[in-house]
Image (cartoon, rainbow, N blue to C red):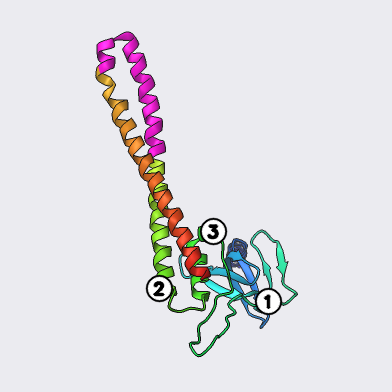
Amino acid sequence: MNAVKLKLALLFFLCSLIGHTQDTLFLKDKQKLIVLVKEVSQTEIQYKKAELKDGPMYITSKNDVEKIIYKNGYTEVFKTEVAPSGNDFAVYGNNNVSVNTDKIVYKDTKRRRSSLISLIERHPDEKRKPELLNLSKSMRGLKAGQDATRTVGIVFGGITLATGLLTGLIYSYDSYAGESFAVVPLAFGTVALISTAVAVTLHINLKKKRHAFVNLYNQ
């Protein structure tokens, strides 16, 4: 009997421990969700289900949320109604042209992929969404390429410095061997320079894409 009680106590402890590694979302309709809160903005809350950490991102209005208890014990209560997201549009003439009044700035393009997709989905002009999506994909590819080539440039730059110092030491003892070994830092240095140049080029193109995204979104 004691062994059964011990197992039950251990199971309860493990369940409570797991629960404290997640956030708890309390909705105003009395639902209680165990989630991973990713972002809380002025109008909405983005989260993932605790059992689907690699799953889709869910978005709910802050008007529908009573409070959040975070995994560290902090409680955030939402008492006041927030204004709806700025997706207002006006209709002019007989063409039913929707005008976007939810403007973005350059730094908004540096958001995480899920937040950027959320911005695109809220855009009132359906015709622009495919082009905005293509721009966001291009931005993501350029950012990944920039990070990769910059890392390669830094790594090979460090190796160039190390092998250059080693070449200097070898040359001080044996000038012929030092000259022969000099090809090693030269090769690493060439890779570092090429990688850095590519990273700079990708960075410039990424900035252009981001400005194009802002201009298209705000038209």
Q: Is residue 39 above or below residue 193?
A: below
Marks 1/2: CA distance?
28 Å
Q: Are marks 2 and 3 in contact (CB under 8 Å)?
A: no
Write the residue at 55% across / 85% down: 92
Q: Are marks 1 and 3 in contact (CB under 8 Å)?
A: no
Residue 86, position as x, y percentages in the image: 61, 75
Mark earlier in primary sequence (1, 2): 1
Marks 1/3: CA distance?
23 Å
Residue 101, position as x, y percentages in the image: 59, 74
Q: How many marks?
A: 3
Kindly state the secondary structure of the residue where label 1 is placed: loop
Write the residue at 65% across / 79% down: 64
Mark earlier in primary sequence (2, 3): 3
Write the residue at 24% across / 12% down: 176
Q: Is residue 203 above or below residue 87?
A: above
* Magenta-colored stretch includes residue 6: no
Residue 8, position as x, y percentages in the image: 60, 67
Q: Residues within 10 Å of mark 1 (few under 14, many from 20)?
A: few
Label 1 vs label 2, nearer the camera: 2
The magenta segment is: 153-179
Q: Which residue is mark 2?
A: 130
Q: Which mark is residue 106?
A: 3
Q: Residues within 10 Å of mark 2 (few under 14, many from 20)?
A: few
* Magenta-colored stretch includes residue 175: yes
Kindly state the secondary structure of the residue where label 2 is placed: helix
Mark earlier in primary sequence (1, 3): 1
